[in-house]
Image (cartoon, rainbow, N blue to C red):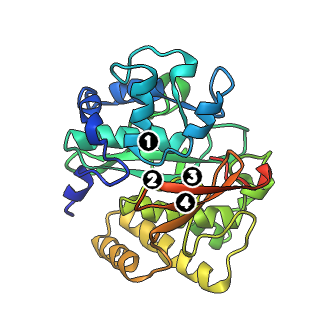
Amino acid sequence: MDVSRYADHSPYSDPRHHAPLLAAVPPEPASLHAAVTTAVVHYRAGTTPPTPAQLDDVDRRWVASILDAVADRAPGPLDAPRSPEQQVGGCCRDHSLLAVAVLREHDVPARTRLGFVDYLGAEGFRHDHVVAERHDGARWVRFDPEAAPDDVAFDPHDLPTGEDAPFETAAEVWSAYRAGRRDLTDHGAGPDLPWLTGPGFVQRYVLADLAHRQRHELLLWDVWGASVLPGGTPDEGTVALTDRVAELTVLADGGDRDAEAALTVLWATDERLRPGRFVTTWSPTGRLGSTDLATRRTGWAAVPADAALVG
């Protein structure tokens, strides 16, 4: 399979004039971890409460914008020491996309993947998460740039794969649910956020994972096409489409080249799967926005905080 397109920047991973910052990071696991976790702090998992600026950071969709904030607050290498307030607020998507951007800057094929993990948050709950994959010339190596080896009981730089692995793709989770092997009430943004758990939440991640696989690394709270809105339930047509995407994704991850080709064709021909110029953004800041992906601008309107898509 030709993976060369994953070595090129997408509009989302393109650092623009910040390319030297990415090029200075060696494309190996320890350096990637140090760089992305020093530059970006998870807005819900930092050692100090996020500043207002860091809360606004979570909607920086583009790596170039993230690096604008990095350079403005603490000029220097990405892994240079920073005080908590100098870090850029973000989430797992930003850690992983930044790692992917570094790899692509070094011409290494890389991509982000969406799914659920059993090593974050409450025991017995599978938390939504974004990890990355790099191609080593023979296979896709899945890794979590946010995790350090001492943090987990497995190698975060070469994650186990498959159903029941520490990280499962959204497609694997959906397929297990549809086969009756999984109850999705314990899959989502957190057990304290019941409106952000369940089939509707996982369904949206199946389609978002496809978008990321196609180098459209949108925010976790962007909604478009056949994505189910927060608290919503997919209709029969949406379920059938999601079943097909999940089936092809699982097969393609297993090395089925026909499935990979079919997934690409489905993406190209079914408008329900592709974001258009505009997406709806349900920010964890409590804002609802319409984002113009062409101009990179979002128009905001306030919504209740419990309607936000927490990542």
Q: Which mark is residue 96?
A: 1
Label 2 element class: strand
Look at the image and tell me whether residue 46 can be seen: yes
Disc 1 and disc 3 in contact, CB within 8 angstroms: no
Q: Residue at x 45, y 31 (%)?
A: 69
Q: Is residue 244 above or below residue 59?
A: below
The residue mark sitting in front, 1 or 3, is 1
- The residues bearing labels 1 and 2 have C-alpha atoms spaced at a distance of 9 Å
Q: Residues within 10 Å of mark 3 (few under 14, many from 20)?
A: few
Q: CA distance from mark 4 to mark 2?
A: 9 Å
Query: Of the residues under marks 3 and 2, which one precedes in the sequence?
Result: 2
Residue type marked 4: Ala
Going 68% across and 67% down the picture, which residue do you hit? 229
Disc 2: CA contacts within 10 A as few (<14), some (14-19) or many (>=20): many
Marks 1 and 3, Cα distance to the nearest angstrom?
Answer: 21 Å
Q: Nearer the viewer, mark 3 or mark 2?
A: 2
Of label 1 and label 2, which has the lower sequence position?
1
Helix, strand or loop at label 3? It is: loop
Residue 119 lies, in percent from the top left, at: 61, 38
Q: Which residue is mark 4?
A: 170
Q: Secondary structure beneath disc 4?
A: helix
Residue type at mark 2 is Arg
The amino acid sitting under disc 3 is Asp
> Could you tell which of marks 3 and 4 lies nearer the N-terminus?
3
Q: Amino acid at mark 1?
A: Ser
Residue beneath disc 3: 164
Where's the N terminus, which quadrant? bottom left
The residue at which mark 2 appears reads as 113
Q: Which residue: 23% across, 50% down? A: 7
Q: Are marks 1 and 2 in contact (CB under 8 Å)?
A: yes
Q: Quadrant of residue 5?
A: bottom left
Tell us which disc is closer to us: 1 or 2.
Answer: 1
